[in-house]
Image: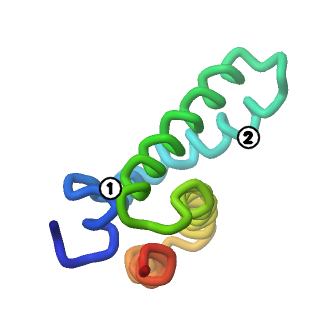
Amino acid sequence: MGSSPEDRLHPDLDLPKYLNFEQPEIVRLFAVLSVEALQVDHPAHEYFGQRLDRVRDAFRRGLEQWHPEPERTAAQLIAYLDGLQILWLRDPSTPALALWSDCADRLLAT
């Protein structure tokens, strides 16, 4: 296993890559679509619901072997990453990787 908390989540999981720092327009599009898809009649409603389930399940599975609260921590990781993306979109000078590292240290510590 790796030495960082996120490596303990899953050795191959590089969470910051999901923030797509090189493509803010893709992150912005994803954020807008995911919020619009909260409406039940939106064409992407089912997709985003299923995606959330898959991501939460993947995080939970990565945590359940060693973390005392895998379900709760998986939800917290998703909430933090979603919020961090919005913060970074509003202010690109946000030290997102440092903030993620701080969060991972706290949430993934046991």
- Snapshot colouring: rainbow
Q: Measured along the vertical axis of the image, is residue 106 above or below residue 50?
A: below
Residue at (32% x, 55% y) in the render: 17
* 78 sits to left or right of 64: right
Q: Check disc 2 and report the residue beneath it.
A: 35
The quarter holding residue 40 reads top right
Quadrant, the C terminus: bottom left
Indicate the position of residue 69 as horizontal and vertical percent values.
55, 64
Mark earlier in primary sequence (2, 1): 1
Which residue is rendered at x = 56% and y = 40% of the image? 30
The one of 50 and 84 positioned closer to us in this rendering: 50
As helix, strand or loop, the secondary structure at mark 1 comes to helix
Q: Closest to the observer: 76 or 46?
A: 76
For image coordinates 59% across by 27% down, the residue present is 50
Image coordinates for residue 9, horizontal then vertical, percent: 34, 61
Secondary structure under the numbered disc 2 in the rendered image? helix
What amino acid does circle 2 point to? Val
Which residue lies at the image location 25% right of the left edge and 66% below the top edge? 7
Q: Amino acid at mark 1?
A: Lys
Q: Position of residue 66 (x, y in %)?
A: 37, 65
User: In the rendered view, would you say 69 is above or below 64?
Assistant: below
Q: Is residue 93 visible?
A: no
Question: Is residue 81 visible to us here?
Answer: yes
- Residue 3 got which mark? none
Left or right: residue 63 versus residue 11 is right
